Image (cartoon, grey):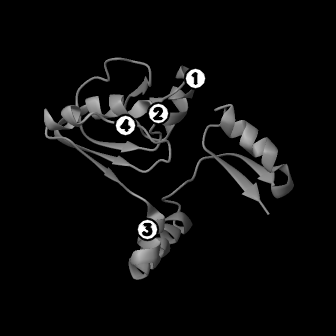
Amino acid sequence: MGAVSDPGKAAFVRGLGADDVITYDRQDWGEPVDYVLDAVGGDLLPSAVTALAPHGRLVAYSSGGGTVAAYDLLVGAKSVIGFQMALIARGRPELYEAWRREVWRLYEAGELRPAVHAQFALEDAALAHAAIEERSNLGKVVLVP
């Protein structure tokens, strides 16, 4: 399942492989799930925790912040864990390097297909930021030096 801010983005997320897509504002996210990968955070975080099944785990890797009431974790024995690749790069450089090589191998084999919304020249960084702030992008916004 995927979650989007705008119903107009649902087809894009389905095209990436999601079986079902809901909007962030929907109260009922359907059947509980075992895992949530949260790249959004903020106001979405409590709803994502609610979507977890008992003993479910949420991996937060956004910088959007957000808070979760401890009670919401206790009643379902749920957990929230943070993930930051930079921490692995600093603390386990050999592991980071192995993952980096594997990601490039998968990309070169055509198994990873990044979704790029738009590319901007570095001098047009303000336009790239505007696209992100408007939340109009479907995929990554790339700055090209």
Percent x, y of residue 3: 43, 31
Where is mark 2, residue-wise? 14
Element type at mark 2: helix
Question: Which residue type does callout 1 highlight?
Answer: Gly
Structural distance between the alpha carbons of marks 3 and 2: 31 Å
Please name whichever residue, 10 or 131, is drawn nearer the observer in this view of the structure.
131
Q: Residues within 10 Å of mark 1 (few under 14, many from 20)?
A: few
Residue at image position (48%, 41%) is 16
Instruction: Estimate the x, y position of residue 83 in percent, counting from the top left.
Output: 38, 57
N-term mark: 1 or 4: 1
Q: Amino acid at mark 2?
A: Arg
Which residue matches tag 3?
87
Location of residue 54 (image quadrant): top left
Between circles 2 and 1, the one closer to the viewer is 1
Which residue is found at the position 49% from the left and 35% from the top? 13
Rounded to the nearest whole Å, what is the CA distance between mark 2 and mark 1?
11 Å
Gap between marks 4 and 2 measured at Cα: 28 Å
Mark earlier in primary sequence (3, 1): 1
Q: Is residue 140 left or right of residue 29?
A: right
Residue furthest top in the image:
27
Q: Amino acid at mark 3?
A: Leu
| Labels 3, 4: front one | 4
Mark 4, residue position: 67
